[in-house]
Image (cartoon, rainbow, N blue to C red):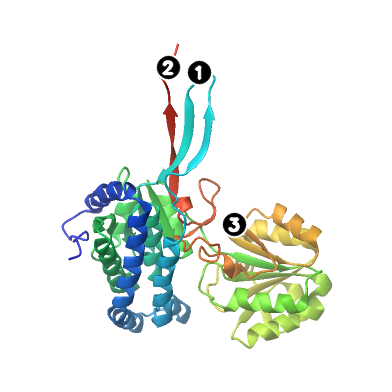
Amino acid sequence: MVSDSSDTNLTIKELAQKVRDAAYQLALTDIQQRNQALRSAAKALRAAEAEILAVNTDEVAQADVSAAFKDRMTLNHDRLRAMAKGLEDIAELPDPLGKELASWDRPNGLHFKRVSVPLGVVGMIYESRPNVGADAVGICIKSGNGIVLRGGSETHLTSMAIHKAMQQGMIDAGLNPDSIAMPPDSNRQHVMDMLHAVGMIDVIIPRGGYSLIKFVQQEARVPVLAHAAGLCHTYIHEKADFEKARKVLVNAKMRRTGICGATETLLIDQAIAKELLPILVSDLQSLGCRFVGNQAACQIATEIKPAADKDFATEWLDSVLSVAVIKDINAAIHHIVKYGSSHTEAILSEDKQAVRYFMDSVPSAVVMCNASTQFCDGGEFGFGAEIGIATGKLHARGPVGIEQLTSYRYEVYGNGQVRS
């Protein structure tokens, strides 16, 4: 039977304390036990597919939200199987715990080691995508961390069904399921209580829209690992391969418009814009994309409507693309620095010197060359999955996987030394 770690009588701090106690036990397990828990959780997810999808179908049908938001909410057979496969992929990764990160000796004979350890308890606050909960739990199991989950209200019941399956996986592997917890309802007060759970929760990771993440960053008393927005740019340099650029841009924008790695702004050099931009607009328009752009872009393609300055600072998460025809690579970099969110940028160019200059100049967590920005994903990076994307400059940057959810301790070995 699944442990009732979502007891309605528990406050968030009491719930987090149960998680902390269980996480202490989890951190002491060997890698075989944690891997078995991941495989068992994957099996439990597959076994619960009918229940999870039925609940999700009802929630999606009842939600009064945009089509893009509904897509983020929706689970189906393939997405659920991908969730389970993601857990199995994490199980195949090396153990991130107990790794000797560095070692050295001092003249007095003391031997020092820096060794990887879990962070402790992660608080995960996410909005519409229920698969985020499974990914987050999988990464936390592997890295020996406990987790308190708070999913979006629109998919609360779906998230609870996934949580139940993940706990069952822990039980089947002989581990304490209390290291995975979720409040029993979608009361917004739970979010504030998690943000203030100093000493109970070690780090908060928000995943959702701009307003959620800014709220968390402003209100949290617990350290936050987050990105403020996924305002990603694709820059097409004058030395780009046109066919390559067409293929990459369609994927970067339209594969899934509602994810944080989707391209929101196209920057294109004026030297090639008259020839290439109408073709790019035609490619994307045939897939339902709409456009806003600067004056130079509007003059080249009548399908592009005039953009306000705020449009270039907007994370659309929809079939809308901001377009700017710019002078050169320096103008592209300036635009990204001014409007970007330090998430992911891509340059499409066959000029190696230009690529190197762009990568060295753009201050983002991830910079790509001749590839879709939608590759900014933990699974695509070989991390198995991710718990979020970090755009800050402390502790972790880019996709947050198992290694990014570890800290370290120092071990000091002596032979009777005393300090003078």
Q: Is residue 366 left or right of residue 359?
A: left
State the image coordinates of residue 218 (x, y, percent, origin top left).
43, 51
C-alpha gap between disc 1 and disc 3 = 45 Å
Asked if disc 1 and disc 2 are in contact, CB closer than 8 Å, the reply is yes
* Residue sitting nearer the eye, 206 or 109: 109
Q: On the image, numbered disc 3 is attached to which residue? A: 342
- The quadrant of the image that shows the N terminus is bottom left
Q: Position of residue 70 (x, y in %)?
A: 42, 79
Sequence-earlier tag: 1 or 3: 1
Amino acid at circle 1: Asn
Q: Which residue is mark 1?
A: 108
**Who comes first in sequence, dot 3 or dot 2?**
3
Q: Residue beneath label 2, please?
A: 417
Instruction: Tell me the residue at 45%/65% (across/down).
Output: 89
Residue 126 sits in which quadrant? bottom left
State whether residue 364 appears in this view: yes
Cα–Cα gap, marks 1 and 2: 8 Å
Q: Nearer the viewer, mark 3 or mark 2?
A: 2
**Residues at marks 3 and 2, CA–CA distance in whole angstroms:** 48 Å
Residue drawn at x 44%, y 34% as measured from the top left: 410
Kind of residue at badge 3: Ser
Question: 376 or 419, which is in the foreground?
Answer: 419
Local packing at callout 3 (Cα closer than 10 Å; few below 14, some 14-19, many 20+) is many
Instruction: Say which element carries label 3.
Output: loop
Q: Position of residue 323 (x, y in %)?
A: 68, 73
Q: Residue at x 50, y 18 (%)?
A: 108
Q: Is residue 111 above or below residue 368?
A: above
Crowd tier of the residue under label 1, counting other residues whose Cα lies within 10 Å: few below 14, some 14–19, many 20 or above: few
Picture quadrant where residue 252 is located:
bottom right
